[in-house]
Amino acid sequence: MIRNGPGNGSIHLVSVVLAAVLVSIGARSIPAVGTILRGPKPVVMDPLDLPLHGYYGNYKNHPDLSAALGNALRSGSSVVLFGSSELTSKDDPAKPVGFFGQESKVPMIAIGHAGNQSFSIHAQLISANAPLENAKLVILLSPGWFAGSSATDGTSLEAFLEYQPSPSLAGIAERLRSGDSTALPIATYLIQHRSELSGAQPVVKWIARNTDPLDRIRYAFSQPWAWYGVKAIAEMTPASSSSADAPTLTVPAIEAAEWARLMGEGTARHLALCTNNHAFVNDEYYSTYVNGATREVEAVPLDHSRELRDLQALLHYMKQANADPLFVIQPLNPFVYTNLRALDPTINSIREALDRSGFDYLDMWRSDTTGYRPGTLTDIMHLGPVGWYRVDSAVVAHFQ
């Protein structure tokens, strides 16, 4: 209790009531059970436990996901796969979460849908607040991130907030308040998006205002009061249901002959779905979105690509953390996109950045039809059975 000065008892009482109200509001917004998305359909399941396994579209229904992810990264108890829209394509036996769960009994958590780009992934690793030396990390890079407005704008605020709910951001706020510089990229990002924060939750505004020197003066009176709400959110955030790390996993080897069999089956499975075109696009997608048309990518000058800078910052963060990730450079369909060579300089910059960092990567990019294998993509941009099996094979080889 604050003892010096008149009226301080009433101030203390108001602050306690304010915190209690914020807790009650926040508590009603956080469900007792989470919803894991397996493909597009939600499945209700018990609170998170290690080892993590399954597909999560975002963090909105999982207030303890960041803490559980931190445990998984620290212990290496699950393969952690970050990606975007390819993770929401139709299920196939080759898709990694199902493949590793069935074929190798290896737990894998896949996180993301469209919009989960380089900075969003970087921010999730920051929020998880775990050492990465033992982490089994795989990151799928979509060429679409590095073209058009996705490249110039980088991760949108809407997408960022899907992976940074209030409990995660309250933890970031506490770290910033204590001087943890590793959390600064999130604060910097929010300052850069300050014009979009009018309807944001209080914790988002608190971080932005506390980081900017002018805002600290402008909101000198309201910020200490707002801190009570941030602290209340942090205190009511559920911890991961696992109190101890799960053991580090072992990824068993798979024989070359078995991979050849799987690739052959995947090719046949895909071609059976491609009967109305010669672009190796499944019939349903082709009839709905292509129907004989071609497309062009909108290449962006390298020095105008925020996404490329965000990727470089992510690589630097992982390098500093002694991580050993596997990256995957995905392709676009060269039978539909007619100017893929325009994106070659960007793809080359990505390769060079990965090489400088010393990180392994599977490179599936093709700027023409030469060497393109049917089934690599199921449509014009999302991995198909052959592409997924190539990812599976690279994961096994990398984590041997």
Image (cartoon, helix red, strand yellow):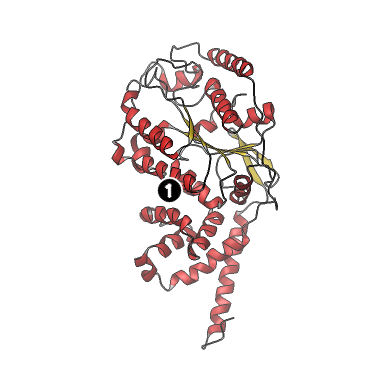
Q: Could you say which quadrant of the image residue 397 lies in?
A: top right
The C terminus appears in which quarter of the rendering? top right
Question: Does 74 sit left or right of 164 as displayed?
Answer: right
The residue closer to the viewer here, 221 or 254, is: 254
The residue closer to the viewer here, 249 or 226, is: 249
Residue 340 appears in the rendering = yes
Q: Could you say which quadrant of the image residue 206 lies in?
A: bottom left
Question: Does 269 sit left or right of 159 as displayed?
Answer: right
Residue 55 vertical position relative to residue 276 in the rendered view, above or below: below
In the rendering, at what x and y percent does residue 120 appear?
47, 45
Q: Residue at x 36, y 38 (%)?
A: 151
Q: Residues within 10 Å of mark 1 (few under 14, many from 20)?
A: some
Residue 62 appears in the rendering = no
Residue placed under numbered mark 1 in the picture: 157
Q: Residue at x 54, y 66 (%)?
A: 229
Q: Could you say which quadrant of the image residue 18 lies in?
A: bottom right
Q: Residue at x 65, y 55 (%)?
A: 239
